Image: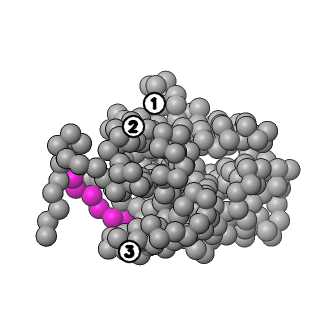
Amino acid sequence: MPAAAHVHLEEVEGSFDVAYLAMKATGVEEATRQVAPRLAADGYAVTLQNGVVEDCVAKILGRERVVGALVGWGATMHAPGVYEMTSRGELVVGELDGRVTPRVQALKAVLDAAAPTTVSANIYGVLWSKLAINCVITALGAASGQLLGQMLRRTDVRRLALTMISETIDVARASGIRLEPVGGTLNLERLYLPPGRRSGGLGLDLAVKHAIMLLVGLRFRKLKSSMLQSLERGRRPEIDFMNGYVVDRGREAGVPTPVNAALAAMVREIEAGQRPITPDNLAELAVQAGHK
């Protein structure tokens, strides 16, 4: 039976048992405030954004009324209401406190109809692992205008990527977050560079890390940054929920995140019309990071 579709929340009567927040991270706070008075007494919201928005949503609804979710597949919007799934993957859902509850089991059964879904007892670890990857793919793509495969062919960009992932791991560790393997297979600890090795150095282990990044770039070579697509459409980029979020959490924990901070500043300059989107931005970023 076809589902009823509505453009405005006011068109729908009654309360909601579950609200799926499926907009960009930049719109999640407004959407949460709109849906809050419409949730049933035991209703909850499911967060389906890039970046980490769970704390923002929980401040409005309360932590007990939020279920975190990760979307492990990619899609591109070609026109309003016209979307293409560009990569396959699973959905992961979990309670913020790590419990495996009947409601997340029921949520899994519903979402299985859309994509294979698993329940995690460490949803923050899942979300932060994707955050580390998105800080690379999404923000570097927004600054350069390039597809992932084009970027990761460059040694200096792979070094930037490894450094940004390592900074995110530092903040996660300081925040007591145990990262989960990306897609259930890629352990980000294999890509970790200690602070003293982020601006230079050689070695077999570094060659292996670069090889992993090359393989990622080859497999997802046609992936286009969602943040770049937002900038091209004149919309706000999600930088505050990705690299900016890492920088803010790092500041709270006393952990330096200079490369993520520099890239976040670049994207904000692009948004403000003060900087063009060009691959030259990545070369400039590499110089700032001490990689050249």
- Classify residue 216 by image quadrant: bottom right
Residue 204 or 31: which is nearer the viewer? Answer: 31
Residue 12 picture location, percent across and down? 19, 47
SS category of the residue bearing label 3: helix
Q: Amino acid at mark 2?
A: Arg
Query: Does residue 246 appear anywhere in the picture?
Result: yes
- Foreground mark, 1 or 2, reads 2
Query: Does residue 222 appear anywhere in the picture?
Result: no
SS category of the residue bearing label 2: helix
Q: Is residue 87 magenta?
A: yes
Label 1 Cα crowd, 10 Å radius (few <14 / some 14-19 / many 20+): many
Q: Amino acid at mark 3?
A: Ala
Label 3 belongs to which residue? 109
- Classify residue 152 by image quadrant: bottom right
Residue 177 or 286: which is nearer the viewer? Answer: 177
Mark 1 touches mark 2? (CB < 8 Å): no
The N terminus sits in image quarter: bottom left
- Earlier sequence position, callout 2 versus callout 3: 2
- Earlier sequence position, callout 1 versus callout 2: 2
Label 2 belongs to which residue? 33
For the stretch drawn in magenta, the main secondary structure is strand
SS category of the residue bearing label 1: helix
Label 1 belongs to which residue? 271
